[in-house]
């Protein structure tokens, strides 16, 4: 009997919920390390004894830490922002401004949930000054993911959340661990420029370094799986890995007629 899957409580562009069937056969072990945890779709649907989950986004990790520490109390607090009065552009922009003015701790974490569910397409985007700049989403009644947050809490008992880059997280792996990496993808087209992509904080050189460290860890008995687009760039970067490629439905374009299958891959180092 197929186990029911658990959806993340955050909306997240590029989430791996749709790739779970492809990933599952490769994720077997006692400890899973994710340097790019994002919404947590992978860890929520895998059965490991322990999890070390990291991300470079401090707002994301602050949220996970607050939820794990305060449990029901935090969920009730986050829910208080979800009402009809707050579902307006005026309220959204006020909360976004407060969020961007040095807010800390649990209120920042609760507002991160609010912004995620009320912002356009659930995007998580910051300007060069570090300000959250996603516009208002104009939803009739934004969904408060209470059920999903409680399930997250159950899994979080076995997890440690840390803010840091992929190098720091991968350095904490030991023989027998499994590392799953879901970095920002390379440009879809091999001819596309890395200019705007690098501005988002993950350059071509970092893609190469990630592959280098994956190979190094595999030589020490750590299995590493990396997901990315399948194109000439990634084929070169992952030349030392076993490659599994497959088509994936794209949900990027605003024009439904332009959405189609894009080829993605798993680079497996073992």
Image (cartoon, grey):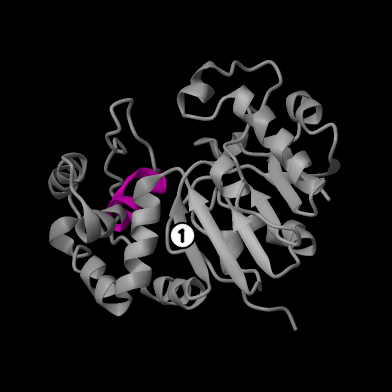
Q: Is residue 173 left or right of residue 83?
A: right
Q: Position of residue 170 (x, y in %)?
A: 62, 47
Image check: 174 left or right of 12? right
- Residue 145 visible in the snapshot: no
Q: Which residue is located at x 14 percent, y 49 percent?
A: 91
Callout 1: 10 Å neighbours few (<14), some, many (20+)? Answer: many
Q: Is the magenta stretch mostly helix, strand or loop?
A: helix
Residue 117 magenta-drawn?
yes
Q: Is residue 253 above or below residue 171?
A: above
Where does residue 71 sit, x and y in percent of width and height?
33, 76
**x%, y% of residue 76?**
24, 74
Q: Quadrant of residue 126?
A: top left
Q: Is residue 84 above or below residue 13?
A: below
Could you tell whether 76 is left or right of 13 in the image?
A: left
Q: In which quarter of the image is residue 123?
A: top left
Above-or-below relation of 166 to 203? below
Q: In this view, does 176 lie to the left or right of 200?
A: right
Residue at (50, 45) in percent of width and height: 13
Q: What element carries label 1?
A: strand
Quadrant position of residue 140: bottom left
Eyeballing the image, is 248 above or below 131?
below
Q: Position of residue 231 (x, y in %)?
A: 76, 28
Query: Is 72 contained in the magenta span?
Result: no
User: Which segment did they paint magenta?
Assistant: 113-123
- The image quadrant where one finds the N terminus is bottom right
Q: Is residue 149 in sight in this rendering?
A: yes
Q: Mark 1 points at which residue?
A: 161
The answer to which of 163 and 18 lies nearer the viewer is 163
At x 56%, y 51%, the residue is 15
- Residue in view at x 63 percent, y 17 percent: 192
Residues 134 and 48: in front is 48
């Amino acid at each position: 009997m197929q186990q029911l899957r658990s959806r993340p409580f955050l909306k997240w562009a590029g989430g791996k919920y749709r790739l779970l069937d492809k990933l599952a056969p490769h994720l077997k072990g006692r400890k899973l390390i994710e340097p790019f945890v994002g919404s947590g779709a992978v860890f929520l649907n895998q059965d490991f004894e322990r999890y070390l989950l990291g991300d470079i986004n401090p707002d994301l990790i602050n949220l996970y830490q607050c939820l794990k520490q305060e449990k029901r109390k935090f969920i009730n607090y986050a829910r208080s922002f979800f009402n009809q009065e707050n579902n307006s552009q005026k309220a959204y922009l006020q909360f976004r401004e407060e969020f961007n003015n040095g807010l800390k701790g649990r209120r920042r974490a609760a507002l991160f949930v609010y912004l995620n569910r009320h912002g356009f397409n659930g995007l998580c985007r910051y300007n060069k000054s570090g300000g959250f700049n996603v516009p208002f989403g104009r939803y009739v009644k934004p969904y408060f993911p209470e059920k999903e947050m409680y399930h997250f809490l159950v899994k979080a008992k076995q997890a440690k959340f840390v803010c840091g880059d992929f190098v720091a997280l991968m350095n904490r792996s030991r023989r027998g661990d499994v590392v799953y990496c879901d970095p920002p993808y390379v440009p879809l087209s091999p001819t596309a420029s890395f200019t705007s992509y690098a501005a988002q904080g993950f350059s071509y050189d970092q893609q190469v370094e990630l592959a280098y460290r994956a190979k190094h860890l595999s030589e020490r008995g750590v299995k590493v799986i990396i997901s990315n687009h399948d194109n000439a760039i990634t084929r070169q970067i992952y030349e030392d890995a076993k490659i599994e490629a497959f088509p994936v439905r794209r949900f990027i374009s605003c024009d439904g007629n332009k959405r189609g299958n894009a080829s993605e891959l798993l680079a497996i180092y073992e």
